[in-house]
Image (cartoon, helix red, strand yellow):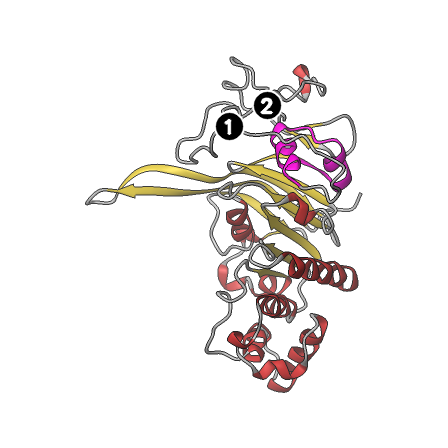
Amino acid sequence: MSEPLVRIEGLVKTYPVKGGAFQKVLGTVRAVDGVDLEIYQGEALGLVGESGCGKSTLGRAVLRLEEPDAGSVIFDGVDVLRVPRKDLKGYRRDAQVVFQDPFGSLDPRTSVGDSIAEGVRVQGLSRKDRGRRVAEVLELVGLERYHANRYPHEFSGGQRQRIGIARALAVNPRFIILDEPVSALDVSIQSQILNLLKQLQRELDLTLLFIAHDLSVVEHLCDRIAVMYLGKIVEIASRDDLFSSPTHPYTEALLSAIPIPDPTVRRQRILLEGDLPSPLNPPTGCAFHTRCPIAEQGLCDVSVPELRPVNSGRHEAACHLRTGDHQDLNRPLLNSQ
């Protein structure tokens, strides 16, 4: 197997929580808590989980839009967290991002062409070459060359997200992080953007980290999927393995919420009790045990499970009762209905 293009090792990002008249530190939120991930050249890795689990923070930390507290991000053999900021120009070209809000990520006072050209201007292209590149990427994402002279408010939400993708593509990146890129769009527009991304990935040999809260969104785009809960990866597998043989109870619950486009088929819905625990005061042991229908007292609330292989291959899960010494893949989920 080839070396991964991106290797994330032990990544940690915390935020101090302050309060009172003197802004005293009251605690620490561990938004990303020791994450390990590998992303291979040309693949699309999905990262899914509930809002507040740390997905977007992980993406920003990988890009060094926020500085991690510990760990490493090795891109093409170089740990970019050890590179001084002034020397990150090459990484800024190779690694790009598409944000969730297509309107908020564009300057309303700047034409679409100038917004797209900003990255290539920083990379040193001449005005003539910048204009040519803007026209090329607009056509790549299904827009017209004359759209370069218009402003963001003149476009629909789907068109603005195409502009955001064009801006990311302008510098010929190798790796793109897509942070909830379709969550603000109508379902019909979502499918168009997902099809566009799949086409671009294939044609340009792009490597993608696709962040989403909905497993159904990543199903048709991603080769592998990692499931995140309260700052940790709890399961990672190929798309087919994850959908056919989910191992972690949290993954099963997420999959059970996906509607089936067949009125004659009913899926058992797994209802999780309670809300996502506060990252300021996470549970002891397995972070999921407070909502897990199969948790065992004295084990799950005491010991933190590690990611372990499931059977064979590259399928891993962090569950005491589904992997390792206590493995029982047939253990039922108690609140299915």
The numbered mark, 2 or 1, whose residue comes first in the sequence reads 1
Q: Amino acid type of disc 2?
A: Asn
User: Residue at point 53% right, 51% down?
Assistant: 81
Q: Residue furthest top?
A: 298
For the C terminus, the quadrant is top right
Is residue 99 shown left or right of residue 220? left
The disc placed on residue 303 is none
Of all residues, the one furthest to the left in this rendering is 21
* 260 with respect to 156 (left or right): right
Q: Which residue is mark 2?
A: 335
Q: Which residue is mark 1?
A: 273
Of residue 313 and residue 123, the one placed in the foreground of this image is 313
Residue stretch in magenta: 236-258
Identify the element where label 2 is drawn: loop
Q: In the image, what residue type sits under mark 1? A: Glu
- Which residue is painted at 70% across and 51% down in the image? 5
Task: State the image coordinates of residue 300 (x, y, percent, origin top left).
Answer: 54, 19
Whole-Å distance between the Cαs marked 2 and 1? 9 Å
The percent position of residue 56, horizontal first and vertical second, equals 53, 49
